[in-house]
Image (cartoon, grey):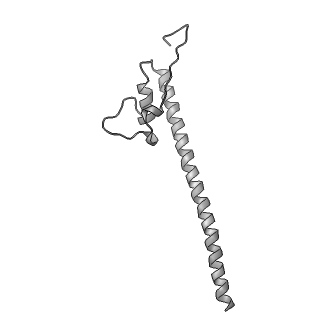
Amino acid sequence: MKRSNQRGQSMVEATLVLLVFFALLLGVIDCGQVLFAHQSLVERVRTAVRWGVVHPWDSADPIVNLVLYNQTDAPRGDTPAFLGMQRENVVVRHVAPSERPDD
């Protein structure tokens, strides 16, 4: 009789350990997804800023479109933006130098 009790105890212990293990594993995967999304957004913003510095200022729309859609023109149709963002989430400020306002 003692053997079946030990087998049941091992199953209960294994279940508890596996629950904790899988919870930690899912937590690590979730953190990895958040870090990946953050880094992707940082790269997109960096690319949009670089494009804005190189090209003459016309308006903020091309820069916003680069962040949201990875292209300077707004796409036709109902294309979803990057990470579900909206235009209100992207703020572009242009400050011209006082001595050379065309720069």
Q: Position of residue 29 (x, y in %)?
A: 56, 54
Q: Where 28 falls versus 75 (above or below)? A: below
In the displayed image of the protein, which residue is found farthest to the top? 99
Q: Is residue 38 left or right of residue 64?
A: right
Q: Residue at x 64, y 88 (%)?
A: 4
Q: Position of residue 53 (x, y in %)?
A: 50, 22
Q: Residue at x 67, y 88 (%)?
A: 3
Q: Residue at x 33, y 39 (%)?
A: 78
In the displayed image of the protein, which residue is found farthest to the right? 2
Q: Is residue 34 left or right of residue 5?
A: left
Q: Where 1 falls versus 44 (above or below)? A: below
Q: Residue at x 45, y 27 (%)?
A: 63
Q: Where 41 falls versus 95 (above or below)? A: below
From the image, which quarter does the N terminus lie in?
bottom right
In the displayed image of the protein, which residue is found farthest to the left? 77
Quadrant in the rendering for residue 23: bottom right
In the displayed image of the protein, which residue is found farthest to the front? 88
Q: Position of residue 93 (x, y in %)?
A: 50, 22
Q: Nearer the viewer, residue 12 or 32?
A: 12
Q: Position of residue 51 (x, y in %)?
A: 47, 26
Please give the count of numbered marks on the rendered protein.
0
Q: Where 62 falls versus 23 (above or below)? A: above
